[in-house]
Image (cartoon, coloured by chain):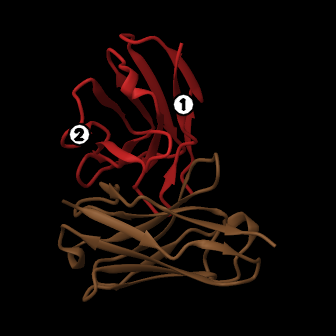
Chain colours: A brown, B red
Amino acid sequence: EVQLVESGGGLVKPGSSLKLSCVASGFTFSSYGMHWIRQAPKKGLEWIALIYYDSSNKYYADSVKGRFTISRDNSKNTLYLEMNSLRSEDTAMYYCAKGCYSGDYFDYWGQGVMVTVSS
Amino acid sequence: DIVMTQSPSSLAVSAGETVTINCKSSQSLLYSGNQKNYLAWYQQKPGQSPKLLIYWASTRQSGVPDRFIGSGSGTDFTLTISSVQAEDLAIYYCQQYYDTPYTFGAGTKLELK
């Protein structure tokens, strides 16, 4: 059974940093691209980052480019999202999601982790 | 960026009805190299993570009931839910994966009449 379990969220002040983790199980983690997607309270879904299976390529939404860094450790089956210079508009539920071989649709999602940026 | 426009934003239905949700992209999602449309549909129930329903515009994900049907090509796509059941009440999102940044529609909320 595929499982994605996020952690690391919390309440932080504007300008601070936070690092999210997503531990994967039930599939060959090192073979798939992985994504972070977020959802602000009562809002829609926003894709924010992609990392290839071998970390060779990374892509970001403009809203987080230069502030967030996606990474992975295939030996630990873990995906990360390092978030710097956090703003109030980064307040959201953050989901990690598994990509597919043939295309970047998301066939499995984690339960999400809440990040609240507030003074 | 590819803009995804969904309509309607909400829909009130009775159990047993057939509903149609529309999704329009600002550019074609049909890749000529493989003749596939890079469009997916997700269902999100309250308090839950999104769930993949449809990919390649019309391929049903394993385990998804056959009352969920995806159709369309190019820039215009439709999710049809035949004989809506109470468990189908949720928000539905379309998503393009033709090009980064991957983008979602704003969602269509299916409510009980």
Q: Is residue B26 visible?
A: yes
**Label 1: how many Cα within 10 Å (few below 14, some 14–19, many 20+):** many
Q: Is residue B79 visible?
A: no
User: Which residue corresponds to mark 1?
Assistant: B109
Q: Position of residue B105 (x, y in %)?
A: 53, 43
The C terminus of chain A lies in quadrant: bottom right
Mark-to-mark CA distance, 1 and 2: 22 Å
Q: Position of residue A53 (x, y in %)?
A: 28, 78
Q: Nearer the viewer, mark 1 or mark 2?
A: 1
Find residue A17 and report its image quarter: bottom right
- Are labels 1 and 2 on one chain? yes
Find residue B58 and report its image quarter: top left
Task: Name the residue: 75% across, 67% down.
Answer: A88
**Label 2: how many Cα within 10 Å (few below 14, some 14–19, many 20+):** some
Task: Name the residue: 58% across, 42% down.
Answer: B106
Secondary structure beneath disc 1? strand
B47 sits left or right of A2 in the view: right
Residue B28, placed above or below residue B100: above
Which of the numbered marks, if any, corresponds to residue B59?
A: 2
Count of residue discs: 2
Residue type, label 2: Thr
